[in-house]
Amino acid sequence: MEGKLTNPAPIGLTAFGMTTILLNLHNAELIGLGSVILAIGIFYGGLAQVMVGAMEWKNGNLFGTVAFTSYGFFWVTLVFIVLMPNFGWGLTAAAPHELASFLLLWGLFTLALFIGTLKSNRMLQFVFLTLTLLFFMLAINDFGLANIKVIAGYVGIICGASAMYLAAAEVLNEMFGRTVLPIGAPK
């Protein structure tokens, strides 16, 4: 007999939230881009989310599988985009329009997932709405259409904080068997 499967989403949401906050503290020009951001991007934002995606697959949650696995690999890819030119492989740093194209594609993907959240709780909708805005704002900035990276950084901090709130709410609400932190029921 198989036991009850645990909800791994709070781990993935926390990994996503912390990593997003740290990178966007940099985008908001509050901290530098250093080893703390790159390390959390590989291990917690990247590896942990991919592991959570595998756990969501085991639980039969398609949305969680696609979201956590995809954003986990997003973080690993982003760190490698930053680091690869330093490996001595003859690679150059990504040009702004290349990074903008990368971010635009992630924005479109996130918009599709946001539409999927319309059947979920309000907090998850907010996480994906702010993440969609963040990707589009960063793409607009890197395409040179508007200098909005600092503003995007603050949107990213809000996005990451909302993911961490949702993670805490899911854990506490389950632990106490009642709503301790509201997440807004789906329609």
Image (cartoon, rainbow, N blue to C red):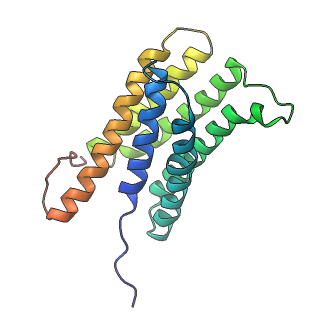
Q: Residue at x 44, y 62 (%)?
A: 61
Q: Residue at x 49, y 52 (%)?
A: 68
Q: Is residue 68 left or right of residue 187?
A: right
Q: Is residue 165 left or right of residue 21?
A: left
Q: Quadrant of residue 1?
A: bottom left
Q: Residue at x 56, y 54 (%)?
A: 47
- Of 143 and 22, the residue lying toward us: 22
Find residue 40 and report its horizontal and vertical position in percent. 51, 44
Count of number-bearing discs: 0
For the question of whether residue 115 can be seen, the reply is no
Find residue 171 and report its horizontal and vertical position in percent. 26, 58
Find residue 185 and report its horizontal and vertical position in percent. 21, 49
Q: On screen, 140 above or below 47?
A: above
For the question of whether residue 135 can be seen, the reply is yes
Q: Residue at x 55, y 27 (%)?
A: 33
Residue pushed farthest bottom? 1
Residue pushed farthest front? 35
Q: On screen, 69 above or below 35?
A: below
Find residue 25 and report its horizontal and vertical position in percent. 43, 26
- Of 31 and 69, the residue lying toward us: 31
- Of 10 and 90, the residue lying toward us: 90
Q: Is residue 29 left or right of residue 80?
A: left
Q: Is residue 31 left or right of residue 179?
A: right
